[in-house]
Structures are given as structure tokens and as C-alpha cells.
Image: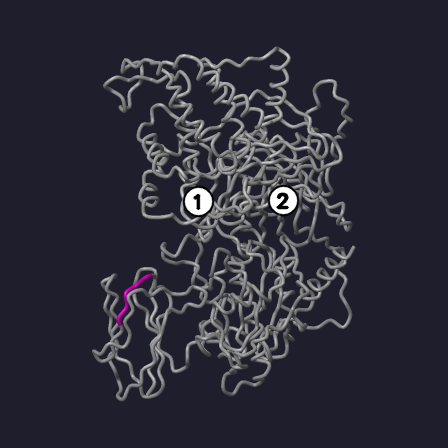
Amino acid sequence: MLLHIALQEGFHHDEVRVLVDAREALANGDVTTRRQTGYAGSVDLDVTRSPVMVEVVLSKRGVTQRKSVSVDRPTYVGLSLTMEGEVVWKLSHEPFGYL
Amino acid sequence: MKEHDHIDQESLAEASEAARPGIEPLLPIIPWPPRIRVSGLYVASRIVTPPIPAPGPLPIQPVPIPQPLPGMVPTSAAPWQIEELLPWGLLREELRLDVDGRYPQMMASGTLYGVLAKRVHWIARLTASGPNAWTGSIWFKDGDVAGFPYTTVDITTTATFLSSQRRAVVRLSGGGTSVRTRTLAFKSPYFRSVEFEFDCATAVTATTKIGTHDHPNRPATLPNETLSIEEVYRRVGFDVRKSGSDTIVPIGDAGTNARWSDNEMHDAMQVYWSRFAGKAQWSLWVFFAKLHEQGTNLGGIMFDDIGPNHRQGTAIFNDSFISTAPTGDAKPVAWVERMRFWTACHEMGHAFNLAHSWQKQHPPDWGTPWIPLANEPEARSFMNYPYNVSGGQTAFFSDFGYRFSDNELVFMRHAPERFVQMGNADWFDHHGFEQASSSPEPSLKLNLRVERAQATYQFLEPVVLELQLTNIGPRPLVLEKELLSMADHMTVIVKKRDKPARQYLPFARYCHNMQAQVVMPGEFVTDSLFISVGRNGWDIAEPGYYTIQIALHMETEDIVSDALTIRVAPPRGYDEEFVAQDFFSDEVGRILNFDGSAVLRGGNDTLREVSDRFGDRAVAYHARVALAAPLAKDYKVLDMGDRMGEMASAKEAGGRLRRAAPHIEEARQLYTSALLEKKDQAIATLGRTDYEYYLGRFRAALVEHGAVLKKEPRDVRRDAKREKIGDVEHTMRVIKEALSSLKEQEPVPR
């Protein structure tokens, strides 16, 4: 089943690791949001069980967060950062669109 | 007349909306009593003063006093006292009054343009204080605000159907200074002008207009009309024009399903946009294609954050997710058309430097907002994502009036031009002369020249420009004699490719005794400009391409030169790279700029090294003339004894002026090597003007130290005349004669 994880708003030269069930799904040492679109990067995974544990690690900010995500149908996870550096999770069953 | 008609049509449309919201009138409703819209742009320009009268008995025809240009409004009330407050002089003034018409923001903004680069921009929030009168506090200032202390503005308009007679009287007060009152003439119902070009990839159709009632999910009060992108931006306050060159961008071998990268679109923009110019301008390229390489999840993008001029190009991807209507939508075709239209307006908004509605507040490392702003996550604005508001896109479009938010309108109408204009960036970056006040029929032309066929310079070689100011008008002109050597009369911009532009700041400014000279039609005056290094450091040093442009500030206008591009070649080898670390220093820069120093020993050592090791290179000529100058004459040096280098007053340190004796033989060798041995090469690198100057200094030094010039009085007068007109060959003959006479005498003591 499709699990799409997108890095969206608020990233600025961040070092980002995303793990799904403790396996590295995305790792990038310099993630910056393109402000015209609010998009910074994404990864598509084919997962075989649900739920999965999604963990995001922002090492420069010293932030680690994890969330259990149900993937019983195509699932889209958006990760954004607030001005205070907190991670905001957005779950959807519709693809994200950027403009 | 056409402009007037447009206002009337606009007024009718507004009246119809107000009278019967949401219901299409069967007959136009004529408002009564008639409302006269006063919002728009008002302007005034400086009334020029007559030039300096010609001195002497020369038979010069009288120079007529220039008449005010169209749009200038002479005022009787204390004209132009602002010059007393603004040390840079005022050339042009604008007022944007925003109190009626579409989406009035009850704001006024003004811009006062002085001589080049000098500008004050202000914005005030208004309340009505009477019929056709408003008052408000100035809450935003930008630019050269030190001479603009005002805090309050009062505006009164002359309401008349004849736009040519419409006026705004602007009274600025507060800030502990006297009141300033100006009358400005109505110019346009729009605040600014902009131009669009819509180009499409092969087999792609641009959606540039829609019927507002085509989709049933809309506000009940939304007027039924055919709305175009141009009209959306006219309602923002722009006088929108089309370039007239909408075209198809062929994708050739790429195939009809080709996806576009940002760089490919940028390339296409350079090739197919009829207005592409690589500079800031109120012009925008809008490209309609099928898909971006990111895929269907990207509906559009303002792709142009490439190169020095951003925000000039934007793209809409017709085959992306915006072409998929929600399942079960009542009118999916209309939904898609509306979404494509909305996306085009949205992406174009980015080109006007608008952020998304939820990005108004952001971390400091993203940059500085023009004013503190609050996020507007629920705004029914072109800059919000319809599907991100509470209730999703259905809720958004049920309450969407095809407009921008008030904050966004204030920005586009009233923010300083450079914040909004496409391709603009920080002041001085790439387009330093956008605000020059040039005459449409200038009487002078400024040329930048170099003494070589190709403007390529060796590594380490200082750049000396020849400035030539030519009278291209039909009448004689009276100019200050030292005009081209007075740095405070000019602004010089140096821009290395792909780097921000820099303003050249000379080490010194000279105060000359004002002397006028008459320049006849077709005649010119010249001078040199040593431009490589100044108070900013070395503006021209690294290998690469540099563009140089100069604006000369005259009494009534700015004379802007064409841009001159030069190239600095890479170093010839490791030796040059190595010595460059010492050469591109402040000391060496000052020595070269001031033609020598007896005290900057480190810099002189570097120049000696350059002269010895790179004798065949152009830089050696500059090093030798700089080393020769202090050796050729008595030189006064401040001797601070043991306290040399300390921050102490000369008196406190027991300092005294010491005379350094000349070293004429060494000076003679250096001058001879630099000026006489390879004359053409010397002129090419030193510039003709400076070459003549150095020859004169050399000759004077020789004479001062014993050279005998055997001449009759008649010859002396003739020689003086020939030297005055720059006869280099003659001066060289004189010098050689002087050198011969020295050989016949006893050696000069060192």
C-alpha cells in the first residue's frame, strides 16, 4: 500500500531523517522548503502492514517525533515545521497538490 | 478620453453591484448624484532651473529657460522647499491615493525621487476629514528618510469629470519641521503599470478568462461576468497591457508529453518572451504547459528564482492535479477551467512577490517581511490554497470573490516599487539606474571608453576608463570645467557577473574652484577614472566579466552612460596568484589611486616586486609611475618618531614634518621605463588622459632638477599651446631633450 511522506513548510537547511518502522526511508542533510510551492521533498513507500511507526529526526534542531500511521489505503503524510520549530503532521488520503 | 471612459464604465459596474448585489441589471444604473472617482496616481516633477550663464564675451546664443514638462504642476505655495530638507534635491514626486474604486484600502503612498538613487517612500492610513479630503498618519517610510521627518498627511482632491484638471493637494506636517504643501496632477486611475505575455507550449491552451457563474458553487452576490486575468489585476490597481506577442513555444523533439524543469522554462523564457531583458521591469512572462518534472502534484510555479532577476516568469501546468475535479462535482469542466484560471492568477501573484496566505509570518532566516504581517490561513484570496481552508475547496469557492486580500492589495499598490516589480531585488543590484531622471531628449551623451580594441584586462592590471561627455544638442552648453573629475557629481556602479552590484566609492573627493567652459555642439570634454579600487576595496580584481555604468548628475537631469562590459583575464601563473594576495590590498590601492606614497612602505614593496617580476605585464606600468612620483620631488613626510603607527595626535607624539629628498635618477628610470619605452602599451593601460598627465609630471620633475630646455620665448609659448591640446609626441620630444641636457651635466645628487 502506498505511503507518501512529504516534507513541506518551514524547512531551512535542515538535516532530516525519516524512518518507517525503524528503517530509514528518507535522509537528507540539507532540506529547504521552496517557498513558491511549500514543498521540500518527498518519498513514496510501498508498505505491507498497517499501522506503521513513522519517525522524523531533525538532528540540528534536536527534535525527534514519531507517530503511528494507519496505511490501510493510500496514505499521504505531510510534515511541516512551525516558526517555533515544532513538527506539524498532516494526514490525508488524497494526494497533496502544490501551487 | 479613453482613460476617462474607463473610469465611467468602472463606476457603472460598481454602482450596479452596490445597488442590486448578485442580480444582473437589465439596464445600466447611473449613479446620482454622479460619483467622481479620485483614486489613482498623481504626479509632479521638478521645474528645472536655467543653466549657468556663459561667462565672457563668447558669442553664445541665449539658452532658453526650459519649460515644465507635461505633467508638471507649478505651485505658488513655497515651491520645492523640500530641497532644503533633502540634501540631494528633488526631481519627481508621486502620490497613490486609494480611497474609492475597487477594494479601497483607505491608504495613500508617496514617493519622492531625488537625483539618482535618492528616494523616500511613505505610506499613510487615511480617514475622511471632509468632502474630497482625507487625513492620516504616516506608518511606513523607506529610503533616504533622514531628511523626511513628516508624520501626518492631509490630502484634498479637486473632484472634476475632466481628469486633466484633477488635482491632489498634499500637505505633509509633523516631525518638528515646517509644513510642506504640494499640488500634484492626476495621471491615471491605476497606481502602477504592468505588462503580461501569455505563451503556451505546443498543444496547450491558456485559460485566461472564465465566466464567473459557470460553476454553481460561488458566492450568491458574485456578479455574472466574463472575467479575464488582465481584469483581475486591473482591479488590484495595475494598468495592465499585453505585450502583443503571445506565442506558441514549440517543444520539438522533446515530444508532446515532455515535462518541464525550471531551467528549461527559464531557457524558454529567454528565447520566447518578447520582453526578456535581464533587468527589472514591470513585465511578466506567463507560460502554460502540460506538466512540470515534479509531476502531477505541481499545478503551477513561479519558477524564476534563477539568475540575478527573479520573479519574471511563472508557469501553469494544465495536466496536473488542477485538471481533476472532485468526484461528483456538478460541473467538472467548469471546475477545471476555474482552477486553471485561479492557478494562473495565483502564480502571477508570486511574481508580484506575494507569499502564500499562511506564509506571512515566517522564521527570520527566511528573510525580512516588508512589514510585520499576520498569517491569513482562511483568507479567500488568490494566494491561499483552496483545499487548505476549513471546509476545503467547496467552502473556499462558495465565498471567493476573485480577489486578493486587503494586506496583499496594500502591498501591490503601495509597497516600495522594488519590493513588487518583477526582476527587482536589492537597490543597486543589477539595475542601479532605474530611477535616474533622464531627459527624453538629452543634450549630452556620456561615453565610457578604454584604450584598446577589446576591453580585456590582464590579471592584476588596474582599470582606467576614459570618460567622454559630448554635446549632442543643437546649442552650446556651459559646463563646469572639472565636471568629469568631481566624484560627487556621479554615481558609478560596478557589477561582476553573478554577483551583486557595488557602488564605486572614490578614496577622495576634490573641491574645485568652479570654472565654466563652453562646449559647442559636437564637442566633448574628457577625463579619466581609475575605477579598480576605492573605499569599498577592490571592486575589480578577480578574473571574470564586469559591467560598469555611470550616471552623471546634472542640474536638471541625469546623464546615464551605456553599460561597458570588461573582462579580467585569469592569472598567467602561480606567481601572479601569489603576489595578488599582497597586491589587492588597501595600501596598494591607495598608492595607485593617489599616484604614489612615500610612507606606505609595505605597498611600495609590493609594487617594486610587481615591477621587477612582471616587467612585461601591464601592471608594471602602473607600479612604475606610482613608485616614480614621490621620488621625483621633495616629499613632506610626517615623522612621528618612535610613536609611528600609534593612534596619537602629531603634537602629542612630538611629530614633525620631515623633508624627504628626491631620488631623481631612480624616478627617471622608472618614468622612462613606464612612459617612453613602449608608448602604445603605456597609453593602452594608463589611459590617454593619465598618460599625458604623467608625461607632464615627468617633464616638470626633470626641469625642476636641472634639465635645460633651450628655447626662445616664442618656442615656449608655442610649446605650451601644443601641450595644452594634448600633443603627446611633442611632450615626449621635450622630455627627451631634457634627458639629453641632464646627461651633459653633473649627476644630480640623490
Residue at 36%, 54% in the rendered image: B364
Q: Amino acid at mark 1?
A: Gln
- The spot of residue B297 in percent (x, y) is 45, 77
Callout 2–callout 1 Cβ contact below 8 Å: no
Q: Amino acid at mark 2?
A: Glu
| Vertical relation: B136 (above or below) B719 | below
Could you tell me which secondary element the residue under label 1 belongs to? loop
Picture quarter with the C terminus of chain B: top left
How many C-alpha atoms fall within 10 Å of the one at disc 1: few (<14), some, or many (≥20)? some
Residue at 63%, 60% in the rendered image: B195
Circle 2 is placed at which residue position?
B94
The stretch of residues the image draws in magenta is A13-17
Circle 1 is placed at which residue position?
B458
Residue with the most extreme front position: B744
Q: CA distance from mark 2 to mark 1?
A: 47 Å
| Vertical relation: B31 (above or below) B110 | below
